[in-house]
Structures are given as C-alpha cells and as structure tokens.
Amino acid sequence: MNATEETHVKQTPLAEPRPADIKGPEDLRAMSPGEVRRLVPRIRRLLVDTVTRTGGHLGPNLGVVELTVALHRVFESPRDAILWDTGHQSYVHKILTGRAGDLDTLRRRGGLSGYPSRAESPHDVIENSHASTVLSWAAGLARAHGLRGERDRAVVAVIGDGALTGGMAWEALNNLAAAPGRPVIVVLNDNTRSYGPTCGGIAEHLAALRTGTARDRLFESLGLARLGPVDGHDITALETALRHARDLGRSVVVHCVTEKGRGHAPAEQDEADRQHAVRPLAPGRPGGDGSPSWTAVFGRELARLGAERPDLVAVTAAMLHPTGLTEFAARHPDRTLDVGIAEQHAVTTAAGLALGGMHPVVAIYATFLNRAYDQLLMDAALHRAPLTLVLDRAGVTGDDGPSHNGMWDLSLLNTVPGLRVAAPRDAATLRRALREAVAVHDGPTAVRFPKGTTGPDIPAVDTVRGVDVLRRGELADLLLVSVGAMAGTCLEIASLLALDGIGVTVVDPRWIKPVPQALVELSLGHRLVATVEDNGRAGGAGAAVAQALGDAGAPAPVRTFGLPQRFLDHGSRAEILESAGLTAPRIADTLAAALLYSRAAAAPVPLPVPRPPVPGTAVPPH
C-alpha cells in the first residue's frame, strides 16, 4: 500500500456497526472505541423493536448493554466463562455471540430461549434461571480449573443486587473468600431492583456505597477485594475495572451501577418494574377472550379477604406485582412482607407468623416452590402451621422454558404430611378455594393455578360430598377425574367419547390432596378411571388417586395422563400440551381404544371344548 492509498483508508468514514454483523465476541474486540459507542444504541434499538414483538425480559437487558459489551471485550468467551445469574439479562450476550439474526424467534417454539441455553451456543455455559445460584456455579468451575491446572482461564459471575438477597449467594461468597487460589470475578450489577426495588439491609448498604456515605464493611470484611462503584454505562471505565479485576489473581467484587430499562422512555418511567417483562404486541396474546388472569382473580380476592380478616399477612419473595399482591399491599401495607429473593426464608418466616397467631399467605410461582421444599416439610408441616401457599404459574407456563414450568409442585406436595392442596378450575372455584384455604387452622394449605386467563366459569351439575360433578354419563364406562384447569379438556374428551357410545362421568375434586373418599366411592361401578393433570405423571395427582383406589380395593383400573417427566422445551402452553399428548382428541383416542377393547374382551366367547389349566401354569383372571 502506497502513502496515497494509506491516507485514503484513514480518511474513509468507518462503516456503521450493526448487531447483525457480529458473528462472535472476536468481532466486538476488533472494533475501535468509537465503533463500540455507535454500536450500543443500535443494540438497544434492536432489543426494543424485537422484544416488544416477541415478549420477554426487556428492562433487565436494556440496563446491561454497556456492561455486556465490556465483558466480551475484556474476556475471551467461551474459554473465559461468563456466567449469568437468573439469565433475565442474557439477550445482549446472545446478540454479541452471533445470535442477533435469530432474536425475532425469541421464546418461540424452535427459536431462541429466553434464558442462556447450552444447546444454542458454547458461550452459554450454564442455563440456570432460578436466582442466587451463579456464585456457587462459579466457585465449582474455578475449583475445577485449578484442579486441572488451567490457570489461564477466568471465571466471571454476573449477579444482580436483587439476587444477593438470596441466601445461597452468601453461602458461595463465604466459600469464595476462603479460597484465594481459585479466583472468581464477581460482577455485581447493582440496578437497585429485582422486579421492584431491592429490599433489606444489603440494599441499604449498597445505596451507601453508591453515594459514598459509607465504606465497604461487607465484602472486604469477608476477605474479598472490591472495585467500584463503577458507572455501568461507561464502557471505558468498565473495561478498566474488569481488566484490573482480572489481573488481581484473587476473588474480587466489581460493583457496577446500572439503570434498569435504560434508553427506553416507557421502561425508565415504569416505576413498578421498569418493564421487567413485556407481553408480545402480536394478536392472540393471553386475554383475548376478555376473561381476567388467574393472578388478577387471586389478587382481588385476597385484598377483599384482607379487609375481613385482620390476621391475614401477604408474603412475597421479591415478586409483589407478578404474584398479584399489589392491591393487598396498597390496602394493608403493614401486613405485606417482601423478604427478597429468598423463598426458603419466606416459608419459614410464614411459619413463624402462623406461630404468632397470624395467617400468612405466601404467593410464589410454582417453579420456585422447589427451593423451599425442606422448609415446607420441616417447618410448616411438621409444626402444623396454618399458612397458605398460593402457587401461581402451576403446570405448563410455556415460553419461559424448562426451568419455569410448574410441573413439579404436585409431585412434591403429595409427599408432605398434613398438607391440603386445592386446584381450582376457574375464577369462581379459585375464589372459593382461597377462602376455604385461609379458614384452615390446623395445618398448611396450598392453592395452585396456571399462567394465563381463567376462561369462562364451568358450573357443576351436581356435588357429591365436596366433589363437583361436571357431567354425568348415561353409562358407567369411565370416571374422568379433572385436575384444576384441565376441566375444559376433560369435558371435550367426554363429548368425543360419547360419539363412540361411551358413557363418561367427569368430576372435579377441587381439593386433590388428600384424595377425597367420595372419589373412591364414585369409582365403584365404573369400568375405568382416568385422571388428567398438567403436572408430571410421576407422583402427581393421578398417582395419588391410583394409590387411594388401590388401597381401598376399588376394582377399576386407573389411567393417568400428565406431563412426561422430562425438561420441556419452550413454546406456547398449547404447543407444549400438544407435544405432551394432553389434548382432548389424543386422550379420547387412547381411552376409546382401552374401553372398546375391554368391552369386547368382556363379551362371552363360546369355546367348542372346555380346556382345563395346564399343570404348573396360572389361571388367567376373568
């Protein structure tokens, strides 16, 4: 290249960098600081344009654009592991690791996951989406690197200030501080929020650090180095701090201050949760039938109950608005308790409230109940504490992916002695179940319901000792037991089977644990009993019904229909139920084949010559 050509190249304006042109972090590292600065608003524009159409976690990602850029410019993923706590904020990471072109498939079946996904990219090292776990992952991975002699690989754990309210994070910090030879770079993304504002003493300490009114007596007292606070939207400052942290050779906390929802006015002005999650703008989203959401029905009824019952206390684990407690909190702020992202603490605190004469209602997503099983078993149930768990998003949730499907709760709850569990089928039975649950004074109760809208109420045609009969068949062929929101599907199954001349009685126990004695009695005289639930089949409601009927000596065999016991890919609720075979036509075909075969098998067949049993063989059952 001659001097004239070199001068021409230097004077040519740089091409505008586009997110879609980034095929991997190496492209980002090759950019000049000026190119990077021009890239940042384009990433935000892509996020807003795409996520408002697909739905998903918008606010968290808008807040970490510069932070994610800096991480991928300083560290060499995937050799250097960048781990994300919860994963709400991983969309920018996906863009910078070559997935910008697929962002419009976000949370759709066959498209990009809304969380890190090991199947999508080697840059997604872990795919956890339950909060406060990343520091433990990082501690283990750093130890593995040390044992293998891999001293040139960094482990970076990005965790929000909201996730620091979870106890598991502090268990990990306690161990990291005592392991100087296994350095982990803890990037504390401090945006003062989880969904809503972060609560508790840790939040107050971080606020003092941000304003410079206190020195760090928390991390440094554990023996951890701390850098910052750093402006989380200044890429140069971030890169400088991250390089310093990398070169320290010890575990260090890099305190980055960011703004959730940054750069998008509707998010910045949303005081509730800075547009933490947005629904898709496309037609057909939940609520098209005009019915309220399950969450809204629960929230309104609890607020009414709070006015009637001064002993009711609402407990949330950093999810006041998502679990429907907003109205209760507005009316009864002194009886609303946010414990942060700490489900275990929430349940045992509720047991303490019950011990003190209150009746706590712990509102939580069904998937997060997994984390508090021990507390439910040993603190609430063992002490017969009168508290109520309200499990939102039970069953298939769909587009949030495998970690958020609430398909484990019934399997777990069925093992808890003395616990009563209700599964309402519609808005009317949800209101009724909640009132019945908080009226129980001798042990814990649980009420579960799915994500989405309630649909129209489904009236009972009769009630048999607390078990609602939704349809009576003219023939006693099949007793079909509906669990919760599967009632509409069960009624459709009955209609399809009626076309084959099969008589079906559809019942809804409403309270499914313990199995009502009336259900055992109703099974008598039917040739087959079938259960339909949107929980895993292993240990679920169907398994409990089969055990109860077997223990009672009921003669009818039981067929259970539920979710397969595997982690289900993301997609709409309807798509996942379809793939699991939980649709009326599929179930009706299976039951029709079983019933018509058994009917034919029961018909007498004349034998020309009676044949005695062959010695040494068993006589087949009649």
Image (tube, rainbow, N blue to C red):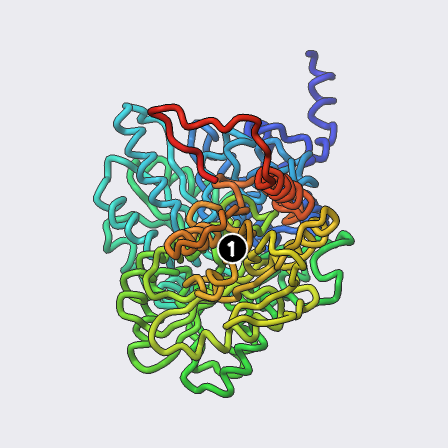
Q: Judge whether 617 appears above or below 512 on screen.
A: above
260 or 325: nearer the eye?
A: 325
Name the residue at the left extreme: 178
606 to the left or right of 375: right
Which quadrant of the structure image shows residue 278? bottom right
Q: Is residue 181 left or right of residue 490?
A: left
Q: Nearer the viewer, residue 409 or 260?
A: 409
Question: How dense is the environment of label 1, judged by Cα within 10 Å: few (below 14), some, or many (20 and up)?
Answer: many
Q: Quadrant of residue 91?
A: top right
Residue 396: x percent and y percent? Answer: 57, 50
**Which residue is outermost to the front?**
609
User: Residue 558: image x %, image y %?
Assistant: 50, 48
From the top left corner, tell me how far across and down residue 460 is, in percent. 63, 70
In this rendering, the count of numbered labels is 1
Q: Is residue 163 shown to the viewer in this render? A: no
Q: Which residue is mark 1?
A: 258
Instruction: Out of 12 and 382, give the one closest to the viewer.
Output: 382
What residue is drawn where x is 49% and y is 39%? 566
Q: On the image, which quarter does residue 260 sit in?
A: bottom right
Q: Is residue 44 above or below residue 352?
A: above
For the point 24% across and 52% down, the residue is 222
For the N terminus, give its image quadrant: top right
* Left or right of residue 148: residue 84: right
> Considering depth in this image, is 27 or 411 the residue closer to the camera?
411
Q: Secondary structure at mark 1?
A: loop
Q: Residue at x 38, y 33 (%)?
A: 154
Residue type at the position of mark 1: Thr
For residue 529, say whether it is visible.
Answer: yes
Q: Position of residue 412 (x, y in %)?
A: 39, 54
Residue 448 position (above or below residue 387): above
